[in-house]
Image: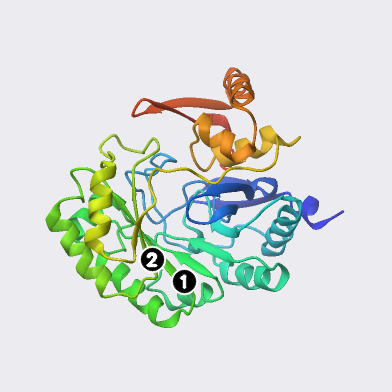
Amino acid sequence: MDTLSACSKVIYYRRGIRYIIAMQSVVFGPVPSRRLGFSLGVDLIPRKYCSFDCIYCQLGSSGKVDVERRSFLDPASVVEQVLRAARDASKVDHITLSGSGEPTLNRDIGWIIAKLKQEVPLPVAVITNGSLLHLPEVRKDLLRADVVLPSLDAADAATFNKINRPHKSLSLSELLEGLKAFRREYRGKVWLEVMLIRNINNSRQHIEMLRQIIDGIAFDRVQLNTVARPPAEKTAKAVRSAELLSTAQFLGNRCEVIAGGPEKKATAKVSRHWEESLLAILKRRSLSVEDIVALTGAPAYRAREELEKLMKERKVEAVTLGGRRFYVAGEEEGSEGAK
């Protein structure tokens, strides 16, 4: 029996609730990404196990937040699964630790990164909300990564609490100190993401405050984003493309807009595991038909046919944002991690 079969499920308990994480769904993609090319995603965290409950989160609101770091999965099995997926994929540009929660809440993340760097000649990226970078052990865990992509959505405490809805133990000042300390210690690339939300953090005054913070930290890139997929709260609304471009110019040469524009295109045709692979991604992000075509290489008519079938089976649901239709995992599929 191989390692993955032996460890196909990991059970843990939190506040009296029994959770099961299926190892076969830990790796997803490769997903075409504007920032990371073809990104092979690695989900180290149960769904919505996060230190934030952001109003723009495309996974919806969890109603709870956590800051306790835990061992959720057998790290050796995670690495083995990533290596298999990387070998089977036609193209991978980055192995990306992200997914459906805050990856630094997995206390094995440092070991996993180090092992991946030993075993596979691919850059490792970590997408994080940055909330735990004030902890020396978290900063140490990320030192072996090739690129770290933290977030900063607010320049004052009130806006921070309104957008990110953090755990009560977290503060904006602590997050900023963590970003500064990490930049001093880390020799890799740091790409800061800023999510702009209409009528909340996009005023000229707030952008000027953000610029003062950004100018004080040597980020390699600053990447502007806005709400492009169905958010957790209706108050999270997109800003217009022209405003994103003018804000990027104001923030300086390191700043670029990553919202909108074409994704990378898949080069492979539909695989025999099309449905399984698609559902694994839809548990972690919503996709339009155009996204699915880019992701899988399937013709649009085939993607629509498959989606209709999955909707009838209640494995997929459709939601609309700004006149565009997006697909997400159905309630049963999306909550598979909690039993």
Amino acid type at mark 1: Lys
Q: Which mark is residue 189?
A: 1
Say if 39 sits above or below 121 in the image. Answer: above
Q: Position of residue 254 (x, y in %)?
A: 34, 66
Quadrant of residue 300 within the rendered picture: top right
The residue at 58%/19% (across/down) is 308
Q: Position of residue 124 (x, y in %)?
A: 58, 65
Outermost residue toward the left in this view = 205
Say if 2 sits above or below 186 in the image. Answer: above
Q: Which mark is residue 221?
A: 2
The residue at 63%/28% (across/down) is 299
| Viewer can see residue 216 | yes
Earlier sequence position, callout 1 versus callout 2: 1
Quadrant of residue 80 within the rendered picture: bottom right
Outermost residue toward the top in this view = 312
Say if 276 sits above or below 52 in the image. Answer: above
Q: Position of residue 92 (x, y in %)?
A: 65, 55
Question: For the residue carrying disc 2, how many other residues have a C-alpha within 10 Å: few (<14), some (14-19), or many (20+)?
Answer: some
